[in-house]
Image (cartoon, grey):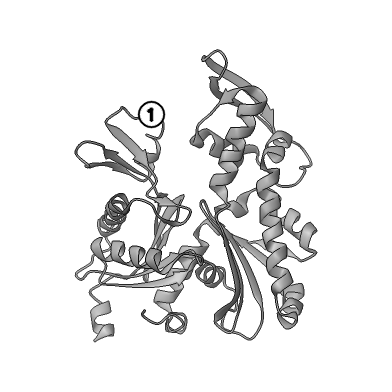
Amino acid sequence: MKDFLSFFSNDLGIDLGTANTCVYVRRKGVVLMEPSIVAMNVSSKEVVAVGHEAKRMIGKTPANIVAMKPMKDGVIADFEACEAMLRYFINKVKTQKHRFLLPPRMVIAIPSGITSVERRAVRETALRAGARSVRLVEEPMASAIGVGLPVGEPCGSFIIDIGGGTMEMAVISLGGIVLTKSLRVAGNEMDEAIIDYLKKKYNLLIGERTAEEIKIEIGSAYPLEEELTVEVNGRDLVEGLPKMVRINSEEIREALRETLNTIVNAVRDILEETPPELSSDLIERGVVLAGGGALLRSLDKLISQETKLPVKVAEDPLTSVVRGTGKMLEEDKYLRLFPHE
């Protein structure tokens, strides 16, 4: 009966991230990746825009419209907005010639450190948004499956997934997580660190979007062969007028130092707790970086220098988690690892 029903329903794998939401349709691949942002009318509670369109509104809305992130630190902060966002993305996928005669099954990736109440909130939100059934998988496991690590074999694999709201680390062996650590220190904290740095050094106030653009354009975790520069526009905190300053990648590295030290120390902590047999595997297999934070220049070099382990960035790290949920839908051997709760 399940096989019969699957012909009438395109099952979905979803990475419900703090920064971006990605959707994988079974047998189709990754079909959607948009910012996890909703613009709502404050008085009528009506959704004005979702995703890319809502992101363009951040910091530019009139008083009656607010552009918000329904996800904070990897968990749902606003249930109504999150349900509206999820429903919008599901409907958008339906209109892309992916017909659903039945409500879809969903595999949703969640942070490893969330509570049972937060897990239930994710499940109920997905059901209200139109899911037939919901299976939850921890993000580091989904990410490891997505990048092709041998999670079912008796050998140690170390995955670090750095998203917008959380950093997930896990040592995996025999289809289970041996050690895991979830930190609410990730891409958003890097953006805030850049905002604070420019405020203190240049009396320049910038927004989250500008901080993210600076991080992408010139951010780095390790000295570069040729340092980069960029012009930044914002508001002068003293005069209250628009102001432009030129900053370089060394300054952004200084701004990110504390956040990067937190990440490196967390990696060291989990390595200290790793059983010796698995530690020997990690010397050979190394560490894999995934998630949007893995795209920060030379982050792999910094972690390798501090841990003395080989570190590599996954291919297409932004979609590693959602590709993992997709593999679970495509291959029963992965889905069997996560029974219904």
Q: Quadrant of the N terminus?
A: bottom left
Vertical comparison of 104 with 82: above or below:
below
In which quadrant of the rendered view does residue 232 lie? top right
SS state under label 1: loop
Relative side of 320 to 90, left or right: right
In the foreground, 177 or 23: 177
**Quadrant of the rendering where the C terminus is positioned:** bottom left
Residue 268 lies, with reference to residue 151, above or below; the image says above
Q: Give the percent coordinates (x, y) of residue 24.
A: 39, 64
Residue at 54% x, 68% y: name it: 140
> Residue 321: percent from the left, percent from the top?
49, 64
As displayed, is residue 66 above or below residue 125? above
Q: Which residue is more in the foreground, 148 or 178?
A: 178
Q: Residues within 10 Å of mark 1 (few under 14, many from 20)?
A: few
Q: Amino acid at mark 1?
A: Lys
Q: Is residue 316 visible?
A: no
Q: Residue at x 31, y 51 (%)?
A: 85
Rendering coords of residue 337 (x, y %): 46, 82
Mark 1 — residue? 60
Please say if 121 is above or below 70. below
Q: Position of residue 252 (x, y in %)?
A: 68, 37
Left-right relation of 30 to 94: right
Q: Which quarter of the picture shows residue 17?
A: bottom left
Residue drawn at (46%, 84%) of the image:
333
Q: Residue at x 65, y 70 (%)?
A: 158
Q: Nearer the viewer, residue 103 or 185?
A: 185
Total numbered circles: 1
Of the pair 235 and 119, the residue shown nearer to us: 119
